[in-house]
Amino acid sequence: MPLLIVILGILLLFVLIAKFKLNAFIAFVISCIFVGVFQGMELEAIIKSIQTGMGNTLGFLVMILGFGAMLGKLVADSGAAQRITSRLVSAFGLKHIQWAVVIAGFIVGIPMFYSVGFVILIPLVFTVAASTRLPLIYVGLPMLASLSVTHGFLPPHPAPTAIADMFSADIGKTLFYGIIIAIPAIIVAGPLFTKTIKNINATPLKEFYNPVILKDEEMPSMGVSVFSALLPVGLIIFSTILTFFIAKDSVFSDVVVFLGNPVVAMLISVLVAIYTLGISRGKKMKSLMNSLSSSVSSITMVLLIIAGAGALKQILIDSGVSDYIGALLKGSQISPLFLAWLIATIIRVCVGSATVAGLTAAGIVLPLVSGTQVSPELMVLAIGSGSLMLSHVNDGGFWMFKEYFNLSVKETLSTWTVMETTIGIMGLIGVLILNIFI
């Protein structure tokens, strides 16, 4: 019976979002109440569970996502993203143009939300394709593969960071393993996949084709741009690696762990970027702070959706559903990693949003980790891989790609959907391979 209630709760979530176009946060709260009531929870207990789930989830994430939005805004507005892309394209040349946009997408994608990175980089891709006379899909799809992988696999992006918190996974290890898995996934879904695409002639709409491109003197240098964009990743990974070589009870160890904490790493990165991408370039502090304020307001709904998913997770725990599912699957021969990937895939197909799919799947499979030897970091990446699978007409990213590249629905399914699915499958393969050695 509890399993049926969960299935009906997920179906309710799907119907409210897909059929009635209800806001995802509202849909999550309604689904929480539905599951709690039919699981026999007292009404007051349901509300307390929802509050606890939201509070525990956002307590960790508000600072990380807030600082992430600020850093992304600084990277975008300063021209650092444009500098990285244009310099890499120039350095790699026409023959290796795909690798240039792949690296650009990866570097820019780490500090930026997917939609922001998309809007910033797509006009540059259009310009590159026009000047080199290369097919737009050939140039653009590899970059989008990079952006998509960073969105689904790597902290400090919302879903992987929130899922890592749910599973008590180490952020540094998640990021490190995620990069290892990301590289082959991007290569296969980007440069290799585009070689198989025939007879698709993407022609961008005119309104997307004439972007405001900053002049060379208006942008920061390449070194400053890359340093500012990747500083949080560098701090987190550097800290994780150092902890293997220093005594855990030393003062130096405490400092290293402190600096590698995602919140601290993001705070330091924002403060550094305020200077390197703002003040040092003659921008006024008041103008910078106004810009950062607007960046935070843009993630309000993302935070609410994540809070809603946290509430559903807590309802599943407090109502006993998680324990029931855990006991049900305890004797299963199916790998918890594959099961997590599969559940995330199913929810992704039904709901559309990768973030919603990942967080919802995490709440369902959370009990699978307790009492097993499976790595929580790999569980995060397995769920992230599943959350990218089979993007279709109920996913906003599907329509962004379709409209910007001016494709038909059929062409979008044969390019975007296949690319996203390739990433999801490669991610699962990478997770299963890493599981052999970890």
Image (spheres, rainbow, N blue to C red):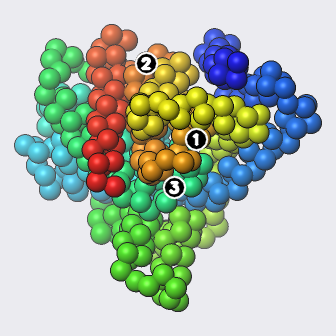
Q: Amino acid at mark 2?
A: His
Q: Earlier in the sequence, mark 3 or mark 1?
A: 3
Q: Earlier in the sequence, mark 2 or mark 1?
A: 1
Residue 241 appears left or right of 16: left
Residue 16 x/y as whole percent: 68, 17
Indicate the quadrant where residue 60 lies. bottom right
Indicate the quadrant where residue 148 lies. top left
Q: Amino acid at mark 1?
A: Leu
User: Which residue shows up at 49% across the image and 47% down it?
Assistant: 372
Find numbered disc 2 in the image and state the secondary structure of the residue it sits on. Answer: loop
Q: CA distance from mark 2 to mark 3?
A: 30 Å
User: Which residue shows up at 42% across the image and 44% down it?
Assistant: 381
Q: Nearer the viewer, mark 2 or mark 3?
A: 3
The residue indicated by pointer 3 is 169
Decide: few, some or many residues near mark 2? Use Cα within 10 Å; few <14, some 14-19, many ≥20: many
Q: CA distance from mark 2 to mark 1?
A: 27 Å
Residue 149 x/y as whole percent: 36, 42
Find numbered disc 3 in the image and state the secondary structure of the residue it sits on. Answer: loop
Residue 308 appears left or right of 65: right
The residue indicated by pointer 1 is 366
Where residue 392 is drawn, which disc sits there? 2
User: Which residue shows up at 79% across the image and 25% down it?
Assistant: 39
Decide: few, some or many residues near mark 1? Use Cα within 10 Å; few <14, some 14-19, many ≥20: many
Residue 49 x/y as whole percent: 81, 41
Tell me if residue 135 comes above or below residue 76 in the rendering.
Answer: above
User: Which residue shows up at 58% across the image and 29% down it?
Assistant: 328
